Amino acid sequence: MSDGEEVTGKKEKAKLQRNPDGEAVAQFRDQDFDFGGKKKQMMGSEGQIIMLDDDDAEAAATPPKQFKASISGTQQKTGKWFMAMLDNEYTVFEFKIAIGDKKWNIGKRFSDFDKLDNRLNDKFGLPPVGLPPKQWFGLEDAELIQMRHKVLLAYIQDCLKRPVLIHSRDLQDFVEMPEEVVKMVSGGGGT
């Protein structure tokens, strides 16, 4: 593919994601709205699970389950870079994610967030909170790592508040959502 064809392909793709006024248009797939054929619960605008047909007064008095994410630490690791010839130190940002009594931990590199952000923007046109700018130097600076960790936490929290993103397999895989939680948020039951 020549450079001209690649640029033309990108322009055509960008046109598909914009309305005639140039505004972003959300890109949805049918499976993003497939809740397993069960209509007992839905995701609220803040990422909480709302029970729709529960007549039990005790259940109605229980606050809805909501995703929560928190910082749990960082790790410095060494990997290979530039055709696997050079050692490269990188940071793994660790987070604790919970909904109700279900809790799990994830660890992600900044590049993982960047890939997710690109996929979500391509599919939905709904950019969550922005990512910090990419940097090539000074990545071992503790202050920079702490600032990035806070921004990445805000990014995860924003994603977990958006029902259309919670139902996206991309986000579910990224946050390593346990299958029982996937079933719970998609209306498949569970606690």
Image: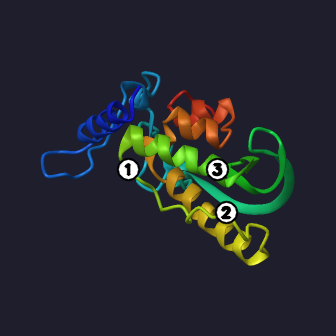
Residue 111, disc: 3
Residue 60 visible at all = no
Residue 37 visible at all = yes
Circle 1: is it few (<14), some (14-19), or many (20+) Cα within 10 Å?
some
Circle 2: is it few (<14), some (14-19), or many (20+) Cα within 10 Å?
few
Point 40% across, 40% down: residue: 122
Amino acid type shown at disc 3? Ser
In which quadrant will I find the C terminus? top right
Question: Where 112 falls versus 123 (above or below)?
Answer: below
Point 39% across, 29% down: residue: 2
Point 51% across, 48% down: residue: 117
Question: Mark 2 highlights which residue?
Answer: 136
Q: Please identify, in this view, whether the residue under mark 3 or under mark 1 is nearer the observer.
A: 3
Question: Mark 1 highlights which residue?
Answer: 126
* Mark 3 touches mark 1? (CB < 8 Å): no
Query: Percent x, y for residue 21?
Result: 13, 52
Label 1: element kind? loop
Circle 3: is it few (<14), some (14-19), or many (20+) Cα within 10 Å?
few
Amino acid type shown at disc 1? Leu
Label 2: element kind? loop
Point 52% across, 54% down: residue: 61
Amino acid type shown at disc 2? Trp
For marks 2 and 3 on the same chain, the one whose residue lies earlier in the sequence = 3
